[in-house]
Image (cartoon, grey):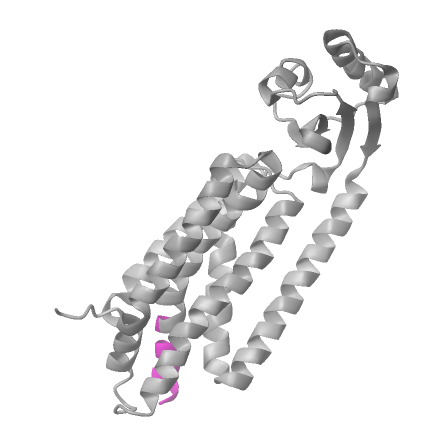
């Protein structure tokens, strides 16, 4: 079976990724920015105990009157409680009016309103700042680890691949106007860890092959290393996706908010580990050889 020449096709791989990212940037500009969720822009929260599990579509018959994009999450014992989160800032009287509609429809007592609150964007600013700091710390840590274990060129290649994964995920969220919330941030940090693990497997094979082949023939070395790890990478990602997709299909809305970016990230991470990180290392190595 003829081996695929990955390195000769690296411009195609780079072009595909750049094209997708550019589409995301254009989409973000056209839409006037990303669709930031309540965690970042502030809004209103209501938590109500119904005494029984109420389907989300029934709750939306009321919440759609003030926000068709309100987040509705089941919580509590046997999911008898509902948490409603909306970017619409409702004052105290408006929150009471909303609860009165639920109270009348489901014959609730006043005590059923467990929590009602309005919070501003300041909390969102703190979450955004902490998320950026977390990503920076994780990136620096990964760069130092890979540089120590392998070499600096491997570290740079891995970081570029991780930035690629985050940008691809942001592109999907931008084009489909999916709200970006704290679950997205947690998922992105998870993806960074997952993607770097896949990348290290390829890098480790490249390092091992460096000991036994002509060190000047880096093109053949990288092609062989990718071919030797390709099936492993695909199988690992496929089994991971089975679990995440199952969570997305069967999970509640809060789980879906976490699972969706994971699905995008696993796909992007698998692609970048094979078609982005290794070709970048090859280009850096060839320039300094």
Residue 79 visible in the current orientation: yes
**Residue at the spot 52% in from the left edge and 84% down from the top edge:** 149
The percent position of residue 142, horizontal first and vertical second, equals 57, 73
**Residue at the spot 81% in from the left edge and 20% down from the top edge:** 95
The percent position of residue 231, horizontal first and vertical second, equals 29, 64
Q: Magenta segment, principal secondary structure?
A: helix
Q: 56 or 80: nearer the eye?
A: 80
The percent position of residue 109, horizontal first and vertical second, equals 84, 14
Q: Which quarter of the figure is the C terminus placed in?
A: bottom left
**Residue at the spot 34% in from the left edge and 54% down from the top edge:** 16
Q: Horizontally, is 151 left or right of 109 in the view?
A: left
Q: 97 or 175: nearer the eye?
A: 97
Does residue 185 lie above or below 150 as drawn? above
Query: Does the magenta segment cover residue 102?
Result: no
Image quarter for residue 88? top right
The percent position of residue 98, horizontal first and vertical second, equals 77, 15
Boundaries of the magenta span = 279-289
**Residue at the spot 32% in from the left edge and 71% down from the top edge:** 229
Q: Among all residues in the image, which is located at the extreme left?
A: 1
Residue 34 visible in the current orientation: no
Q: Which quarter of the figure is the N terminus placed in?
A: bottom left
Q: Horizontally, is 139 left or right of 250 in the view?
A: right
Q: Horizontally, is 250 left or right of 181 in the view?
A: left
Q: Horizontally, is 185 left or right of 195 in the view?
A: right
């Amino acid at each position: 079976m003829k081996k695929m020449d990955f390195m000769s096709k690296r411009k195609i791989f780079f072009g595909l990724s750049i094209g997708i990212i550019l589409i995301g940037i254009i989409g973000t500009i056209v839409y006037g920015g990303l669709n930031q969720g309540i965690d970042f822009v502030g809004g209103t929260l209501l938590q109500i105990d119904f005494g029984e599990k109420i389907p989300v579509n029934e709750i939306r018959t009321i919440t759609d009157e003030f926000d068709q994009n309100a987040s509705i999450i089941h919580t509590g014992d046997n999911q008898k409680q509902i948490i409603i989160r909306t970017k619409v800032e409702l004052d105290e009287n408006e929150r009471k009016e909303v609860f009165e509609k639920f109270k009348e429809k489901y014959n609730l007592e006043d005590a059923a309103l467990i929590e009602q609150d309005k919070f501003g964007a300041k909390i969102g600013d703190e979450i955004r700042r902490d998320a950026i700091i977390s990503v920076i710390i994780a990136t620096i840590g990964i760069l130092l680890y890979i540089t120590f274990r392998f070499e600096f060129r491997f570290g740079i290649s891995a970081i570029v691949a991780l930035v690629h994964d985050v940008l691809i995920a942001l592109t999907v969220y931008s084009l489909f106007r999916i709200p970006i919330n704290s679950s997205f941030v947690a998922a992105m940090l998870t993806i960074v860890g997952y993607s770097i693990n896949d990348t290290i497997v390829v890098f480790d094979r490249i390092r091992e092959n460096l000991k036994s082949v002509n060190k000047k023939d880096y093109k053949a070395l990288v092609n062989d290393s990718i071919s030797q790890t390709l099936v492993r990478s695909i199988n690992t990602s496929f089994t991971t996706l089975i679990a995440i997709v199952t969570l997305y299909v069967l999970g509640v809305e809060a789980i879906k908010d976490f699972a969706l970016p994971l699905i995008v990230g696993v796909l992007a991470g698998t692609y970048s580990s094979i078609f982005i990180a290794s070709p970048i290392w090859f280009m850096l190595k060839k320039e300094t050889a």
